[in-house]
Image (cartoon, grey):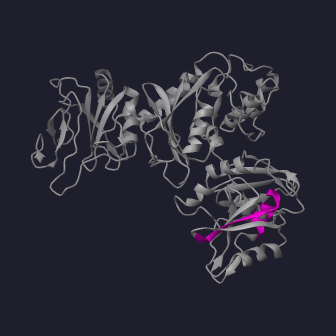
Amino acid sequence: MYSQLMAPSIQIPSTYFAGQPLAQVGPPSSSSISPSIRISRVVHLRNIPSDMVEMEIVQLCSPHGSISNMLLLKGKNQAFVEFDDESGATSIVRSLETIPIQIRGKTIFAQYSTHTELKTEKKGDANGNNENSSGNLSSTNSTLDISSSTQQSPNCVLRVIIENMLYPVTLEILYNVFSRYGKVLRIITFNKNNTFQALVQLSEANSAQTAKAALENQCIYNGCCTLRIDYSKLSTLNIKYNNDKSRDYTNPNLPAGELTLEQQLSIVYKYSAAASVPGSMPSLLTGNPFLPYSLSTNPVTAFFAHPALTASQQDLSMLAGDALTQSSTLSPYLPTLASLSGLPATVSPMRFQLAQSTPVILVSNLEEQKVNPDDLFTLFGVYGDVLRVKILFNKKDNALIQYSETQQAQLACQHLDKVKWYDRIIRVTPSKHTSVQMPKEGQPDAGLTKDYSHSTLHRFKKPGSKNYLNIYSPSSTLHLSNIPPNVNANTLQDSFKEAGYDVKAFKFFPKDHKMALMQLGDCEEAIDALIKMHNFKLAENAHLRVSFSKSAI
């Protein structure tokens, strides 16, 4: 069934609004929004990019009011959004008319729909195809019902609402908080009804369940930024851009995208609103203990280590401390801090800027007689593609390591800080540098700086590499892969024993003998074995791949 409304030459499969068919609307014109058209809760968006997804529509429209329903006409560059009341519809129509917004080169046009209610039904077209929405948020009879997008049963995607948000909550802070309970794969942040919200996808439903139980009703900052957490109906998040609004941690090569004018103004408003709140920057707080995170030289982190803080407060404080950095104007106040509200009223949260976007980490307390750049490249390469390694010439127990992505550097800090290596507890923290410089000609270096930009041993060079899903902290059990079919268990165990390692247990994967688990004496021995045996030649065209396992044998 086909229907014609304003453009007789263009036909689309029938889509119903309040029982009436609707079809293609003509091109944008200055007279599109006519005073004679009655105000409606349903807004018609035109000229949207053909690859635009539901989440982007939500991010565009939700600041104007609560959305109750939505229809995205893929391939037709149109969308229909139904608000809970007419004020939301009026807000976005006037906003886009006054300040046009461009998304990926297309100017978005909005007008009131002639229909007062949005109802959709699936109808097959002449070719038997269905007109439906993308499943990026939810897909039920081609509709997206934002108001009921949660469920009670455990799911790997959590919907997080931040209440009483007096201070900024960045994507980095959310990542650090939730990654303590499992592997965070993707995060999307947006505003709805003037409330900051996020969708957080973890790798497993039980991790999401643990995070929800531990974090529900907890405050990120003392007395504010309260977490309200539900299970989302979504099974996965579809993210197109890695920026301050969304991030796919399994695919660091996604483009940053372009912020619209409205999004830029939203960022300015959020931080200026936080800056206008009188009083001090409160301490971070949680009622549940987190695993310790690195205490770096960041003065903000040092402040949160004040003895007045409880152990659990310190842990969460350190999590967010890595996602905050202080400006030089703040430092005079820090030495005098003696209480949780130690910052004077003249110091606003605006002084706390977003996390330094540095792909460089500082590794300290190394055993300088045993550690070399190649060892650092291999060990730290478990968590990202290492581009350069520099062992400091005048302080050889310290090294700078540059990754290809900031997130990879954060993973290294998360998994390798306070790990025991060569009888030393190493420290891994973000560096103040944003790159590692190669030594100038004639400058003494003694081979302590090496460039690995073109190394064939990078684990994450393929976009969306599955290796991102298998990143774990060092343990006594190693995961072996890329094992050729003619190599048996005895051959593998003998190879490790000949290298001097005490093999406690070995097991092939039941359905895939290309992979196996090997348990060694302790975690420190496993670290050394990974460094020595990764890329070990098993056959003419087969080299062993070694990483840490999350489970023991």
Relative side of 92 to 256, left or right: left
Please indicate, yes or no, whether residue 59 appears anywhere in the rendered image: yes
Residue lying farthest to the bottom in this orientation:
540
Magenta residues, start to end: 512-532
Relative side of 269 to 417, left or right: left
Q: How many marks?
A: 0
Q: Is residue 392 above or below residue 176?
A: below
Viewer-closest of 185 and 373: 185
Q: What residue is at 26 percent from the left and 50 percent from the top?
A: 75
Q: On the rendered image, what quadrant is the C terminus found in? A: bottom right
Please state the horizontal and vertical placement of residue 58, each as a whole percent of the image.
38, 36
Please state the horizontal and vertical placement of residue 244, each as a whole percent of the image.
53, 40
Viewer-closest of 215 and 116: 215
Q: What residue is at 63 percent from the left and 25 percent from the top?
A: 349
Please indicate, yes or no, whether residue 374 appears anywhere in the rendered image: no
Q: What residue is at 65 percent from the left and 38 percent from the top?
A: 323
Viewer-closest of 163 and 489: 489
Q: Quadrant of residue 392?
A: bottom right
Q: Is residue 289 above or below residue 308?
A: below
Please state the horizontal and vertical placement of residue 217, each as a whole percent of the image.
59, 26
Q: What residue is at 28 percent from the left and 48 percent from the top?
A: 74
Please state the horizontal and vertical placement of residue 537, each as a whole percent of the image.
70, 78
Q: Is residue 207 above or below residue 503?
A: above
Magenta run includes residue 234: no
Magenta run includes residue 518: yes
